[in-house]
């Protein structure tokens, strides 16, 4: 059974003037939050993190430059692991702003520090994209995916988080539509996959890798399954892909350059096929996103299917292709 405990949170901000963000606010939030987090937790004030003696124990690289544990069997070819958070910027009101975010696995232990950095980023003189915001409340969806939001923090009060948990997964539908809401960036043979040649296996392969790495480095129960068999089965799944390519502008302060982050958006329709081997991963992907840029809100999708009713996590079983 998949065991990927998450905390899903909703930060509500107030402001004296209508907040204004560009077409890709996730990039601005990620940058402002990272700057505030480093200022909050860095005790050596070293310019570069990796040469620092505290690199492997500091919370800034844990969230933003996540190093693999020494001797890790997975990701030996990579310098960093998937970061344990996802930002989901919401809509701006006349004098308010909502930011949803997800903390994955052990990152929930550090919610207080993460929240402090978020408050500092929003209220700093520079704000987020020039918007100075004041955190009013923090809510937590408990359990994740239930739609039941509870206030766990008010400005001037005490943070009282609820336990993180694995989202309950509904029964497998006979057909469903995956609606990709923000650009999904996945690669095949070293190249980004475009809308004309996109396949179900492109989405599932990226999702399987991401969930595998997240469980390996941010939980106590690494994912154990037949990855090869799953991917062979995924390549045989027929899908109707109604996708387009969307570019989002972003300014990289690290590279001092304007950039574009592009990916596919639209719908992937799955009909009259057995989704049992893939369903737990597809559902969890709604919370952790897929592809590159997930921390900024890219690769976000939702699943539309008839009669989705969640089961308790302990009733979930994985079915392998025969």
Image: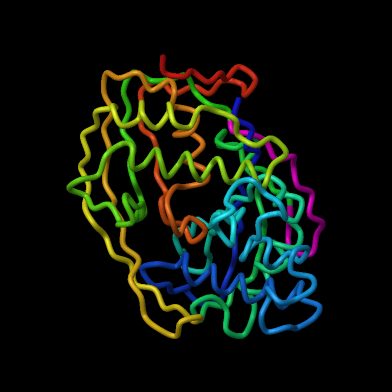
Q: How many marks?
A: 0
Relative to 247, say whether 221 is above or below.
above
Give residue 38's position: percent from left, percent from top.
69, 74
| Residue 77 on image: x %, y % | 54, 56
Vertical side of 49 occupied by 302: above or below: above
Coordinates of residue 21 in the picture (x, y in percent): 43, 72
Identify the coloring: rainbow
**Horizontal side, residue 195 vs residue 290: left or right:** left
User: Is residue 190 part of the magenta span, yes or no?
Assistant: no
- Residue at the limit of the structure toward the top, as seen here: 322
**Residue 157 to residue 318: above or below:** below
Q: Would residue 164 appear left or right of 144 to someone viewing this image?
A: right
Q: Quadrant of residue 55?
A: bottom right
Report the quarter where the N terminus lies.
top right
Q: Residue at x 72, y 55 (%)?
A: 70
Q: Decide: is 188 above or below 247.
A: above
User: Residue 149 or 299: which is nearer the viewer?
Assistant: 299
Q: Residue at x 68, y 71 (%)?
A: 37
Span colored in magenta: 153-167
At 48% from the left and 61% from the top, the residue drawn is 296
Instruction: State whether the magenta stretch is mostly helix, strand or loop.
Output: loop
Residue 204: x and y in percent read: 39, 38
- The residue depicted at 75 percent of the width and 76 percent of the height is 52
| 159 in magenta | yes
Is residue 248 toward the left or the right of residue 33 in the image? Answer: left
Q: Quadrant of the C terminus?
A: top left
């Amino acid at each position: 059974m998949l065991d990927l405990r998450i905390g899903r949170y909703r930060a509500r901000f107030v402001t004296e003037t209508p907040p204004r963000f560009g077409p890709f606010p996730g990039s601005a939030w990620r940058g402002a939050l990272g700057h505030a987090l480093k200022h909050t937790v860095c005790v050596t004030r070293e310019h570069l993190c990796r040469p620092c003696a505290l690199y492997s124990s500091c919370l800034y690289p844990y969230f933003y430059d996540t190093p693999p544990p020494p001797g890790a069997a997975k990701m030996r070819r990579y310098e960093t692991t998937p970061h344990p958070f996802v930002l989901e910027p919401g809509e701006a009101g006349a004098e308010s702003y909502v930011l949803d975010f997800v903390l994955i696995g052990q990152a929930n232990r550090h919610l207080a520090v993460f929240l402090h950095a978020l408050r500092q980023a929003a209220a700093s003189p520079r704000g987020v994209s020039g918007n100075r915001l004041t955190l009013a409340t923090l809510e937590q969806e408990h359990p994740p995916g239930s739609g039941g939001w509870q206030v766990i923090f008010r400005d001037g009060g005490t943070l009282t988080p609820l336990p993180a948990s694995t989202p309950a997964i509904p029964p497998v539908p006979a057909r469903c539509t995956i609606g990709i809401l923000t650009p999904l960036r996945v690669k095949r043979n070293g190249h980004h996959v475009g809308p004309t040649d996109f396949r179900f296996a492109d989405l599932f392969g990226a999702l399987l890798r991401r969930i595998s790495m997240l469980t390996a480095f941010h939980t106590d129960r690494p994912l154990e399954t037949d990855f090869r068999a799953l991917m062979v089965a995924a390549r045989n799944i027929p899908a109707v892909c109604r996708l387009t390519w969307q570019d989002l502008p972003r300014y990289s302060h690290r590279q001092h350059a304007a950039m574009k982050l592009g990916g596919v958006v639209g719908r992937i329709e799955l009909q009259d096929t057995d989704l049992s081997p893939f369903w737990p991963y597809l559902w969890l992907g709604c919370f952790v996103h897929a592809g590159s840029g997930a921390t900024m809100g890219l690769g976000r999708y939702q699943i539309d299917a008839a009669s989705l009713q969640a089961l308790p996590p302990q009733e979930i079983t994985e079915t392998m292709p025969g």
